[in-house]
Image: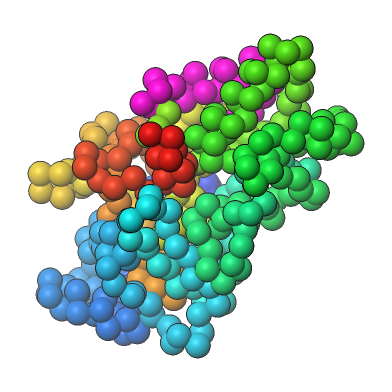
Amino acid sequence: MTYADLIEISPYSLEKNEKKKLLTDRLNELTRLHQAKCPEYARILRAIDFDVDKVSDYEQLPYLPVRLFKELELRSVDKDDIVKTMTSSGTSGQAVSRIFLDKATSANQQKTMVKIVSDFTGSGRMPMIILDCPSVIKNRQMFSARGAGILGFSIFGSKKIYAFDDDMRLDIAALNDFLDSHRGQRVLLFGFTFMVWQHFYKELVRLKEEGISIDLSDGLLIHGGGWKKLESEAVSPEEFHSRLRDVCGLERIHDYYGMVEQTGCIYMQCECGHLHASIFSDVLIRRPTDFSVAGIGERGIIQVLSAIPESYPGHSLLTEDEGEILGEDDCPCGRKGKYFKIYGRLKNAEIRGCSDTYAAKFD
């Protein structure tokens, strides 16, 4: 099956066995592609004496640690075919991952993201408030993870406004004008978790104390990028939601989990508070003792698999995050596939989420 065929399937429609067969076939195909086209990846497979022809289940596929993209230039296309280079978030002094995209991979990332997010937002574009500043979008050839996130979600906006100036000050007048002009319509808000809290929520609280309220009861917020800093402030996801609802009437809030190394295959949080794997990707939990696959309800290291990457060997990656599979095919929201939760970064792992690396400036 080509990716063009796969993208036509509804993202949460396949049950376990059907999804496993489809995804195993696609991931094996990608493994062969990268083995043939990426010399560094081929050397890794030779070193572990790996034979893709013996793989009957994608759980058997080797995985690359995400940190490897900071150390090696991993690409499966000629340099002339690279249309975009994406870089991970990182605090000062950290090396960053470099992800090389050709035209096909970049296009498939965008198409996949549209399919996934539209399942939560509906198919139409909405007026959009970007909870960030315009200066983040600079070099269109070299995207940071933060800039890539903004640009990726911007495709869901009809008319767009940045809520902050370049000093991260809320432009309350422009925000109110925008909301007034779209009164009665659903409005999409997008931002990174810590910035939503630090710059948006806290400013709304201050304004409310001065008698100035903003009504976002028609809003839908999508946010992501890490919870590490908010956990240190003792702000849970539940409190994050309730505080925003209290200060501005915002009810529809969806977190998401994703990374620059597998852009497009994001894991959206459903109405029940669960992160979901679509048919374009999957999550495995590896036991830290022996890296065997953990069962439902077991905490361990998150492995992510994606059917998208053709220009670089990023289809099977071991993250530096800890998580747990909560169930499969039986979430009360009705979506098929695995649903899971994230516990955060592994101890001693580098801070690397968009939200968390920005938050590190406040330490």
Q: Magenta residues?
A: 231-254
In this view of the protein, which residue sits in the foreground, 334 or 254? 254
Relative to 348, does residue 108 appear above or below in the rendering?
below
Specify whether residue 41 is in view.
yes
Relative to 145, does residue 98 appear above or below in the rendering?
below
Q: Residue at x 70, y 39 (%)?
A: 163
List x then y, in percent, for residue 273: 48, 28
Q: Is residue 127 left or right of residue 225?
A: right
List x then y, in percent, for residue 246: 64, 14
Examine the structure image and report whether residue 247 is included in the region drawn in magenta: yes
List x then y, in percent, for residue 307: 43, 63
Examine the structure image and report whether residue 58 is included in the region drawn in magenta: no
Query: So how many labels did they put on this image?
Result: 0
List x then y, in percent, for residue 265: 48, 55
Q: Is residue 177 left or right of residue 312?
A: right
Query: For the view shown, which residue lies furthest in the front direction?
Result: 167
Q: Residue at x 27, y 64 (%)?
A: 68
Specify whether residue 251 is in view.
no
In this view of the protein, which residue sits in the foreground, 215 or 262? 215
Q: Is residue 118 left or right of residue 218?
A: left
Q: Is residue 184 left or right of residue 45?
A: right
In this view of the protein, which residue sits in the foreground, 119 or 362? 362
Relative to 161, does residue 27 appear above or below in the rendering?
below
